[in-house]
Image (spheres, rainbow, N blue to C red):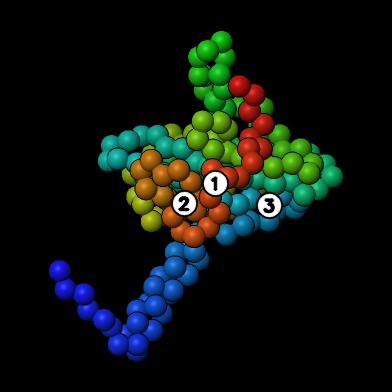
Amino acid sequence: MRIFKLPSIARTAMFGVLAASCLAAASARAEDVKAGDLVISQAWTRATPNGAKIGGGYLTIENKGSAPDKLIGVSGDIAGKIEVHEMAMNNGVMKMRPLDKGLAIEPGKTVKLAPGGYHLMIMDLKSPLKQGDHVPLTLEFEKAGKVQVTLDVQAVGAPGPSAGMGGMDMKKMPDHSGMKM
């Protein structure tokens, strides 16, 4: 094996390209969206195989106000129907159900929609979700109204929106999903 030593100008150029790549990856993340007292962040989904008709959507909603709000609906051109769902353990069995009355976002609290807990159930997909794509959705809140967000499509099986991009490690984040297991 031969080891080549690059001249300092080449090292500097290579470092610049690497730094620019990292910045581009970081800026590709979905931006925080503010709607009234709510801040919606870390909106993402996973890529789906060809022919798949369902997908999941994940995001974090923080209520910085003094009054509760409620996520009551979701829509998007990517699917025939999108619902807010909950997964919970019941007598040793994991069950999933739609939240027909919406998902409450209490004042001063953060609710995380994540795999295995609250999530957006994207049904009747019109086309596969492809890694690198950005999927526009409209969230509807009782007080904040309709809010446009974009889900960043991660790899199949991705653990979260910022894994491997120099962002925060989602596994080290406190769990504020509100799920009781």
Residue flagged by tag 3: what amino acid is it?
Val
Looking at the image, do the residues carrying marks 2 and 3 touch, with CB atoms under 8 Å apart?
no
Pointer 2 or 3: first along the chain: 3
Left or right of residue 13, residue 145 in this image:
right
Which residue is painted at 67% across and 31% down in the image? 178
Q: CA distance from mark 2 to mark 1?
A: 7 Å
- Please rate how many residues cluster around mark 3, counting C-alpha atoms within 10 Å: few if below 14, some from 14 to 19, many from 20: some
Pointer 2 and pointer 1: residues touching (CB < 8 Å)? yes
Q: Which mark is residue 161?
A: none
Residue 105 coordinates in the image, percent (x, y): 72, 38
Spot occupied by residue 132 in the image (x, y as percentages of width and height):
38, 56
Residue that numbered label 2 is attached to: 163
Nearer the viewer's eye, disc 1 or disc 3?
1
The quarter of the displayed image where residue 68 is located: top right
Indicate the amino acid at tag 1.
Met
Which residue is drawn at the image coordinates 50% and 19% (left, top)? 94
Query: Is residue 29 left or right of 37 when viewed as pictured?
Result: left
- Determine the CA span between mark 1 and mark 3: 18 Å
**Which label is found at residue 170?**
1
Label 1, secondary structure: give it: helix
Q: Is residue 81 above or below residue 94?
A: below
